[in-house]
Image: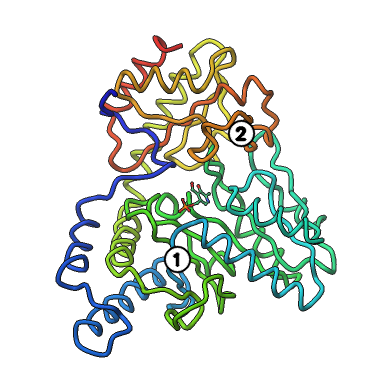
Amino acid sequence: MSETTVYLDNAATTPITDNVLEAMLPWLKEGFGNASSLYSLGRRSAIALNKARAQCAEILGCESRNVYFTSGGTESDNTAVSGAARAARETGRRHFITSAFEHHAILEPMKRLAAEGFDITYLPVYENGIVKPSDLEAAIRPETSFVSIMTANNEIGTIQPVTELAGICREHGITFHTDAVQAVGNIPLDMKAAGIDMLSLSGHKLHAPKGIGILCAKDPYPLLLGGSQQNGRRAGTENIAAIVGLAEALRAAAEHTADKNARLRSMQERLITEISKLPGAKLNGDRTQRLPCNVNFSFPGHESETMILKLDLKGIAVSGGSACASGSLEPSHVLSAIGCSYDEAKSSLRITMSDLTTNEDITAFLQALPAVL
Ligand code: PLP
């Protein structure tokens, strides 16, 4: 196996940064107490937990009591949909709206609800990969109770007009959830300012460890039952080290967003300009309304898997579509939703950067790609 020297798959996962690791270490060793224990060792963990929760709440623009730590984006998304479904069974408002290119952590629970008799509308995302607020307005019915639209797409990075979408939901008394797993840490997002009711995020996409995430929501319906941790709404002993790491990752991301984005935008521009010169290369998703860290191209006539493996031999890690979809024989549902042909969808490469990405990484990739094609 070749050694990866150029890592350009940060939408799949990111490495833990030194500041995050340093913040976590004391809670993995001497500060191992259970936050529910009464003695000092436990109380210290509880204090760290509350401090981390308050820090996350401030950065995300929500109330501290509405921050629930989960195992990641999937659990946060599943919890949001399950809670909405439970409320809908009580009120009879069983119409939900989402988009055609959500992550499977939203689409699969929606599919299960549809099998149970819920009515689900999937909004189109058009060639540019952006939901139209007018489509949302038109899809709303008296029995609509829940809308979930991601803040930024995981494959093509397109940014959705969540403030407008949330505003429409508010006018109609509908709960608005956003899967912000790819957005948080990459673009500024304030729940209160945007009028978002529920938000999901995942630590490992922003240099915190895997297995930790947040659902911001008022009194979410508990998916996990057991102990009375987190107000009885998410049972299980809290992973203090991971929670502290996530709070630190969010703090660092919020502090550096402006500088980081200027740097990423310039590398993104360089990638798009240079790759566009290659024969047949086609950019997927809007050119400007996309995360500064994301570039996604199709190279019809070339298979994603072959390109990925050839780049891997040169020490470069990129993906075709999303990490969870790769390995599947089906073309990406995201690329199909934006109208890509089968050949275009099966020949895509997703290049995603983080604040650790350097201009040298981009140069190495741009030098390797023509030979691979
Ligand atoms: N939502 C989006 C948009 C994602 O990109 C991902 C992961 O790729 C998830 C949800 C799932 O997050 P996790 O891996 O933390 O369960």
Work out whether 200 lies above or below 305.
below
Query: For the residue labelled by badge 2, is the local secondary structure a helix, a strand or a loop?
Result: loop
Q: Which mark is residue 332?
A: 2
Give the residue at mark 1. Answer: 70
Question: Mark 1 Cα within 10 Å, few/some/many (few <14, many 20+)?
Answer: many
Q: Residue at x 52, y 62 (%)?
A: 76
Q: Residue at x 48, y 53 (%)?
A: 181
> Spatial distance from mark 1 to mark 2, Cα to Cα?
27 Å
Query: For the residue labelled by badge 1, is the local secondary structure a helix, a strand or a loop?
Result: strand
| Kind of residue at badge 2 | Ser
Q: Residue furthest left?
A: 30
Rendering coords of residue 24 (x, y %)? 23, 63
Q: Which mark is residue 79?
A: none
Rendering coords of residue 229 (x, y %)? 42, 80
Rendering coords of residue 154 (x, y %)? 52, 43
Quarter of the picture containing the N terminus is top left
Asked if residue 1 lies left or right of residue 304, the reply is: left
Work out whether 122 lies above or below 118.
above
